[in-house]
C-alpha cells in the first residue's frame, strides 16, 4: 500500500482553488497542488461554507492527499464534518483518475479510519456510495462496512449507505 500524507486545505486555499488560482492555493496549503483539485471547485465551495458555519469542522474536512514519497497530489479525502450527536462521521475521498487502481483509496480509507478511531467522540463511520462506483464499493468492503440503507443525493443520485463501528 502506498504511503500518503494529508495537507489541510484552509479557507484561503479553498478560495484560491475555487478561483482556479493554483499558485495561491499551493502557497496557502504549503504544498504544490494540482489541477485535479481545482476541477472540484463545486466541492470546495461546500467545504468552505461548512468551515464558515463551524470553524471546528476544518480539522475534519478538506484535505489534499499527497503521495508521501513524490509529494504528488493523488486525490483528496476527509469527512463531511466533525462527529454528529450520535458520534458518527462520514468519510469522503476521491482518487485522481491517473492514480486509481494503485492502492491509494485503501491508503486514504485506512488513514481516515485511524483518524476517526483516535477521537473518543467517534463511535461509527459512515460511507455513502453510488451503486455504480465499483471501485469505492470494493474499497470499503475491505474494512467491514455493512449496508444500512439508501439515500438520494442531489449531486450523485442514488447512494448506498454503509456503516462501520469504530
Image: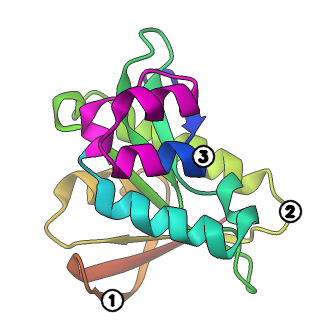
Tell me the tag on residue 150. 1
Is residue 127 visible in this depiction of the protein? yes
Q: Name the residue under label 3.
A: 10
In the figure, residue 83 lies in which quadrant? bottom right
- In reply to whether residue 148 is colored magenta, the answer given is no
- In reply to whether residue 29 is colored magenta, the answer given is yes
The local secondary structure at tag 3 comes to loop
In the figure, residue 25 lies in which quadrant? top left
Q: Name the residue under label 2.
A: 120
Colouring chosen for the image of the structure: rainbow
Q: Is residue 99 left or right of residue 147?
A: left
Quadrant of the image containing the C terminus? bottom right
* Boundaries of the magenta span: 15-38
Q: Residue furthest top?
A: 69
The local secondary structure at tag 1 comes to strand
The residue that appears at 45% across and 73% down in the rendered structure is 146
Q: In this view, does 66 lie to the left or right of 11?
A: left
Q: How crowded is mark 2: few (under 14 residues within 10 Å), some or many (20 or more)?
A: few
| Sequence-earlier tag: 2 or 3 | 3
The residue that appears at 29% across and 42% down in the rendered structure is 20
Is residue 125 visible in this depiction of the protein? no
Residue 100 picture location, percent across and down? 22, 35
Q: In this view, does 50 lie above or below 19?
A: below
Q: How far apart are marks 2 and 1 (CA)?
A: 27 Å
Amino acid at each position: 500500500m502506498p504511503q500518503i500524507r494529508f495537507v489541510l486545505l484552509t479557507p484561503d486555499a479553498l478560495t484560491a482553488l475555487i478561483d482556479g488560482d493554483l499558485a495561491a492555493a499551493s502557497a496557502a496549503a504549503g504544498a504544490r497542488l494540482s489541477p485535479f483539485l481545482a476541477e472540484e471547485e463545486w466541492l470546495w465551495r461546500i467545504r468552505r461554507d461548512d468551515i464558515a458555519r463551524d470553524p471546528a469542522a476544518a480539522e475534519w474536512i478538506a484535505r489534499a492527499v499527497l503521495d508521501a514519497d513524490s509529494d504528488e497530489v493523488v486525490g483528496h479525502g476527509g469527512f463531511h464534518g466533525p462527529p454528529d450527536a450520535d458520534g458518527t462521521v462520514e468519510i469522503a475521498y476521491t482518487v485522481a483518475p491517473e492514480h486509481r487502481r494503485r492502492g491509494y483509496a485503501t491508503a486514504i480509507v485506512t488513514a481516515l479510519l485511524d483518524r476517526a478511531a483516535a477521537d473518543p467522540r467517534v463511535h461509527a463511520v459512515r460511507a455513502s456510495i453510488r451503486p455504480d462506483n465499483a471501485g469505492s464499493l470494493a474499497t470499503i468492503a475491505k474494512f467491514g462496512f455493512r449496508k444500512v440503507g439508501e439515500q438520494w443525493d442531489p449531486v450523485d443520485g442514488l447512494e448506498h449507505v454503509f456503516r462501520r463501528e469504530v
